[in-house]
Image (tube, grey):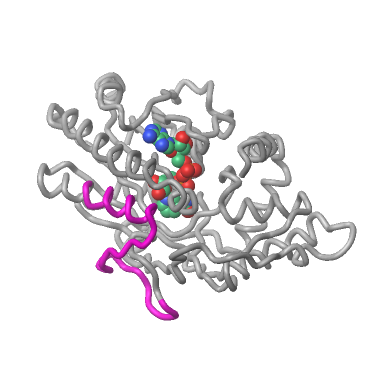
């Protein structure tokens, strides 16, 4: 892996990936990102002047521009993360999810196929997806790579469609595709609409901490840097045509997540009066809210030699410290959200 085209590299996971590839792996990276509301150039300041890193503002649905970037950059690997990613937004305005996640992925696959057909050396297309494509679990069981797809939100349905396209381009055209399906990520530089940064930043600003329904929905939390290492392992060692489920065996209810954040903040940044958990408020549940996701990562551990290093309790404390130390990163985003009426 020497020349990597990353789509969505200005988002939460994409920026962690670009930072890892450039600063630690010393590979050439082209970040292709449209810079929607979720794209944050400030996430990449550490590498923006690094000669190994290049940024192009482009829409993955724009076939002409994407084809030009393939021809110009000559990647040996594509890591495709660009997506609309917030379930609540997909419920209110699904069309953008179909456009970027489905049409955009189709455009990426077609441009990759055209480029790859003229290559003599190796090429990999890593399609990055979510465990939400598998639908919802009750109290028992885990998602593995044979679990049937059963998406239930516009977001997960659009990602499921994209996964099927990626697999179809492998089976039909032989494009060397690898698919990863990962559980909920948390860590530095996550856009403040998502649960973990929302709770941390609301708590710091003495605002209510909204929890959907009874707070009993369960997610399987993975630190973003563990996800990044899994993506690199899948791109380098994954078998083409295969899917790898990525997860950290860290199931927590949303209420437990809120409780862990409140307890850590009570220590790291105590309130003048009361405890942070007093700010928790239960709000009406999200329509169609999946009850439980849980990943069996055994195949990735066995075949990729990857294993999550961070457990939730240590990872969440590190994450909180990052937000405490980087208010210059999140304050402008919070102000932008307030202006947009979010
Ligand atoms: N966040 C999670 O917990 C999680 C878990 C599993 C899988 N995933 C998947 O990982 C990927 C990245 O997720 P994230 O949380 O970093 O998302 P994000 O919303 O933080 O970032 C998405 C990035 O894609 C860019 N983008 C959006 N539309 C685009 C377009 N049409 N053309 C080019 N760029 C565009 C945005 O500007 C942004 O930089 C997504 O594919 C998501 O489905 C996320």
Query: What x and y, as percent, mark residue 116?
Result: 17, 32
Quadrant of the frame with the N terminus: top left
- Left or right: where 191 falls relative to 66: right
Q: Residue 161 in magenta?
A: yes
| Side of 15 relative to 271 (left or right) | left
Q: Nearer the viewer, residue 314 or 210?
A: 210
- The stretch of residues the image draws in magenta is 138-165
Examine the rendered structure and indicate whether residue 110 appears above or below residue 152. Answer: above
Identify the image quadrant of residue 275: bottom right
What residue is rendered at 37% in x and 29% in y?
Answer: 59
Task: Residue 156 in the image: state x and y as whole percent.
Answer: 37, 56
Q: Is residue 184 visible?
A: yes
Q: Is residue 168 left or right of residue 203?
A: left
> Which residue shows up at 65% across the image and 53% down it?
318
Relative vertical location of residue 102 with respect to residue 29 in this rendering, above or below: below
Q: Residue furthest left?
A: 172
Residue 81 visible in the current orientation = no
Ligand 1 falls in which quarter? Answer: top left
For the point 39% across and 73% down, the residue is: 137
Q: Position of residue 169 (x, y in %)?
A: 16, 44
Residue 2 x %, y %: 33, 32
Q: As rendered, which of 313 and 83 lies closer to the eye?
A: 83
Task: Report if residue 236 lies within the magenta region.
Answer: no
């Amino acid at each position: 892996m020497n020349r990597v085209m990353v789509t969505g590299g200005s988002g939460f996971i994409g920026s962690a990936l670009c930072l890892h590839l450039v600063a630690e792996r010393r590979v050439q990276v082209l970040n292709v990102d449209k810079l929607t509301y979720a794209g944050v150039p400030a996430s990449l300041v550490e590498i923006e002047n690094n000669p190994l890193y290049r940024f192009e503002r482009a829409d993955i649905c724009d076939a002409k521009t994407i084809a030009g970037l393939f021809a110009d950059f000559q990647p040996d690997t594509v890591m495709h993360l660009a997506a609309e990613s917030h379930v609540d937004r997909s419920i209110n305005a699904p069309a953008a999810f179909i456009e970027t996640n489905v049409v955009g992925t189709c455009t990426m696959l077609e441009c990759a196929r055209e480029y790859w057909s003229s290559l003599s050396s190796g090429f990999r297309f890593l399609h990055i997806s979510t465990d939400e494509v598998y639908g919802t679990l009750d109290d028992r069981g885990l998602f593995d790579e044979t679990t049937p797809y059963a998406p239930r939100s516009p977001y997960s349905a659009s990602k499921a469609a994209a996964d099927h396209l990626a697999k179809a381009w492998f089976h039909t055209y032989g494009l060397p595709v690898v698919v990863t399906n990962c559980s909920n990520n948390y860590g530095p530089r996550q856009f403040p609409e998502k649960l973990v940064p929302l709770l941390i930043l609301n708590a710091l600003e003495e605002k209510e901490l909204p929890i959907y329904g009874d707070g009993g929905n369960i997610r399987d939390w993975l630190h973003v840097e563990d996800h990044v290492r899994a993506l690199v392992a899948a791109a380098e060692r994954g078998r083409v045509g295969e899917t790898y489920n990525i997860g950290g065996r860290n199931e927590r209810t949303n209420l437990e997540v809120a409780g862990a954040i409140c307890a850590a903040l009570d220590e790291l940044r105590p309130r003048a009066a009361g405890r942070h958990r007093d700010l928790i408020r239960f709000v009406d549940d999200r329509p169609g809210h999946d009850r439980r996701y849980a990943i069996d990562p055994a195949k990735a551990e066995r075949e990729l030699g990857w294993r999550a290093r961070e457990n939730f309790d240590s990872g969440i404390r590190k994450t909180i410290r990052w937000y405490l130390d980087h208010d210059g990163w999140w304050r402008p985003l919070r102000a932008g959200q307030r202006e947009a009426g979010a």
